[in-house]
């Protein structure tokens, strides 16, 4: 899945996700395939919501995506646009794969310079049902300040219909911990549910997402 920089909260300037999850895997769409990700998040303490729709397609060796976001808070709302590029190795018989991801986020409401993120995802296929992911990179905010991005996650396929996901990410000085589940409704449609906590602000984030993969 593709990664984008998203202005999500006053306390969390950049948010990136593989789908609705923050820590990305080192995998891209198969040749000739596209996907559409949609998700909705709710931040009760901030009275904030975020809605995203993000189409992406495999173009040669690269996955190309474009996210459209609508953010609403207590006294403000904004719209954003986020192009994304992702490349990843084909692990074949090797359990390790790696990649490079670049994303930007343009604030269409306020204008100004975009947020940008650049990082490397690595995935280790531990067994048939367990994957470990790690991300390391940098984010550059609206003001030009650069911060580190470090994260790790685990994905456990309980069966063909359910995957449990746990992750931890350090982003713009905040630490985000998330637990979630992915329900495979069919071979091409999946539903994501997750809950996250941001520290030291103790903000909680609840998300639901729907993903559809299809042939181009």
Image: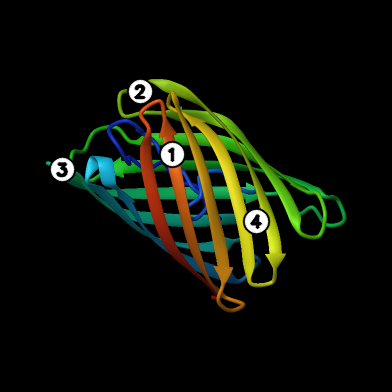
Please report contact status of discs 1 and 3: CB closer than 8 Å, yes or no.
Answer: no
Q: How dense is the environment of label 4, judged by Cα within 10 Å: few (below 14), some, or many (20 and up)?
A: some
Front position among marks 3 and 4: 3
Q: CA distance from mark 3 to mark 4?
A: 42 Å
Q: Taking the image as drawn, is residue 37 in sight?
A: no
Q: CA distance from mark 1 to mark 2?
A: 26 Å
Front position among marks 4 and 1: 1
Label whose residue precedes the other's in the sequence (3 or 4): 4
> What's the mark number on residue 61?
4
Q: Secondary structure at mark 4?
A: loop
Q: Is residue 145 above or below residue 132?
A: above
Q: Is residue 1 above or below residue 135?
A: below
The residue that label 2 is drawn on is 144
Label whose residue precedes the other's in the sequence (4 or 2): 4
Label whose residue precedes the other's in the sequence (3 or 2): 3
State the image coordinates of residue 149 (x, y, percent, origin top left).
53, 30
State the image coordinates of residue 34 (x, y, percent, origin top left).
53, 69
Q: Is residue 134 above or below residue 38?
A: above
Q: Residue at x 63, y 49 (%)?
A: 25
Q: CA distance from mark 3 to mark 2?
A: 26 Å
Label whose residue precedes the other's in the sequence (1 or 3): 3
The quadrant of the picture occupied by the N terminus is bottom right
Q: Residue at x 43, y 22 (%)?
A: 146
Q: How is the image coloured?
A: rainbow
Q: Secondary structure at mark 2?
A: loop
Front position among marks 3 and 2: 3
Front position among marks 1 and 3: 1
Label whose residue precedes the other's in the sequence (1 or 2): 2
The residue that label 1 is drawn on is 197
The residue that label 3 is drawn on is 74
């Amino acid at each position: 899945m593709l990664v984008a920089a998203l202005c999500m909260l006053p306390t969390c300037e950049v948010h990136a996700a593989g789908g609705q999850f923050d820590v990305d895997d080192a995998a891209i769409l198969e040749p000739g395939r596209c996907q559409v990700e949609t998700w909705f998040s709710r931040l009760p303490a901030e009275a904030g919501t975020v809605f995203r729709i993000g189409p992406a397609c495999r173009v040669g060796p690269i996955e190309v995506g474009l996210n459209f976001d609508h953010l609403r808070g207590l006294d403000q709302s904004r719209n954003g646009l986020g192009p994304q590029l992702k490349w990843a190795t084909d692990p074949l018989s090797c359990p390790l794969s790696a990649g490079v991801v670049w994303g930007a986020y343009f604030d269409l409401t306020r204008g100004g310079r975009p947020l940008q993120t650049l990082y490397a995802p690595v995935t280790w296929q531990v067994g048939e049902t367990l994957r470990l992911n790690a991300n390391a990179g940098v984010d550059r905010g609206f003001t030009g300040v650069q911060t580190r991005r470090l994260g790790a996650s685990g994905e456990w396929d309980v069966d063909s219909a359910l995957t449990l996901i746990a992750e931890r990410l350090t982003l713009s000085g905040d630490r985000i911990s998330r637990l979630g589940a992915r329900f495979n409704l069919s071979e091409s449609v999946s539903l994501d549910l997750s809950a996250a906590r941001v520290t030291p602000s103790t903000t909680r984030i609840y998300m639901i997402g729907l993903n559809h993969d299809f042939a181009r």
